[in-house]
């Protein structure tokens, strides 16, 4: 197996993709959303980060985080979030995907795919493109006709502060803006 190397930028802003094991569609379940929200808030209170943008889809989610100055430890945060979500999800009667013996020996569960995808945001243009990608993702996956139609996204917050018009993302030209980052997002 190839060694995977992450890029750490102290105080950086990052784009992340996390996927459920076997792409099981469990994340938009009300219980899962509640647990995930609780776990995020608890993690943020222990190890601060700013959620710039996020979208929750049935089998994965994207997030853009900014870490505090001098901090580049997003891996510990994600490990804790995945672990705590898994414990609480299974305790609440949630399902998990079957896993192999190797993962069982390592005391892994079938809720999340191992690891996650990250991308260090390079500049304001890169940030804008990734935030747009996050908000357009439910349309990309055919779940809704426009970002405004998807309830589990920070898109609505961005509309409220005037960053987006409520009709943003309804046209074909909006979809074409994301062609160049699709292959670099872990999907």
Image (cartoon, rainbow, N blue to C red):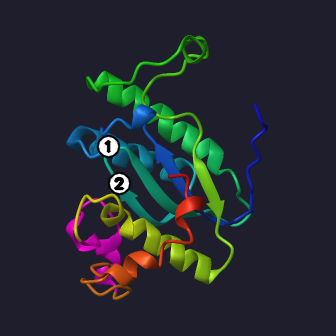
Q: Give the mark, 2 or 1, whose residue is nearer the N terminus.
A: 1
Instruction: Give whichever of 121, 170 is nearer the camera.
Output: 170
Which structural element holds mark 2?
A: strand
Horizontal side of residue 171 vs 181, given as left or right: left
Tell me the quarter of the picture where residue 132 sits: bottom left
| Percent coordinates x, y for residue 181 in the rendering | 56, 68
Which structural element holds mark 1?
A: loop
Q: Is residue 143 above or below residue 75?
A: below
- Report which residue position mark 2 lands on: 56
What residue sits 74% from the left and 62% below the top? 9
Q: Is residue 18 above or below residue 66?
A: above
**Do callouts 2 and 1 mark residues in contact (Cβ within 8 Å)?**
yes
Horizontal side of residue 123 vs 100, given as left or right: right
User: Is residue 49 among the parts visible in the rendering?
Assistant: no
Q: Is residue 110 above or below residue 28?
A: above
What residue sits 27% from the left and 46% below the top? 28
**Residue 155 among those drawn in magenta:** yes
Horizontal side of residue 39 vs 153, given as left or right: right
What residue sits 64% from the left and 45% below the top? 75
User: Is residue 42 among the parts visible in the rendering?
Assistant: yes
- Report which residue position mark 1 lands on: 27
Q: Residues within 10 Å of mark 1 (few under 14, many from 20)?
A: many
Q: Is residue 4 above or below residue 105?
A: below
Which of the image's four quarters has the N terminus?
Answer: top right
Give the magenta-colored segment's residue range. 146-161
**Residue 105 among those drawn in magenta:** no
Q: How many marks?
A: 2
- Distance from disc 2 to disc 1, alpha carbons, whole Å, reads 7 Å
């Amino acid at each position: 197996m190839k060694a995977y190397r992450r890029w750490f930028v102290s105080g950086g802003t990052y784009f992340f993709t996390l996927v459920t094991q076997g792409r099981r569609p469990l994340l938009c379940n009300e219980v899962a959303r509640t647990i995930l929200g609780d776990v995020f808030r608890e993690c943020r209170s222990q190890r601060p980060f700013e959620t710039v943008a996020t979208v929750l889809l049935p089998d994965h989610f994207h997030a853009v985080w900014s870490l505090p100055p001098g901090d580049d430890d997003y891996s510990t945060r994600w490990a804790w979030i995945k672990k705590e979500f898994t414990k609480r999800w299974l305790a609440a009667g949630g399902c998990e995907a079957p896993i192999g013996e190797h993962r069982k020996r390592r005391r892994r569960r079938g809720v999340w795919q191992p690891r996650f995808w990250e991308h260090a945001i390079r500049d304001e243009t890169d940030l804008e493109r990734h935030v747009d990608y996050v908000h357009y993702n439910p349309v990309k996956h055919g779940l809704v006709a426009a970002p405004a139609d998807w309830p589990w996204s920070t898109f609505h917050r961005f509309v409220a502060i005037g960053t987006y018009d409520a009709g943003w993302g309804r046209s074909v030209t909006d979809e074409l803006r994301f062609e160049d980052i699709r292959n670099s997002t872990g999907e």
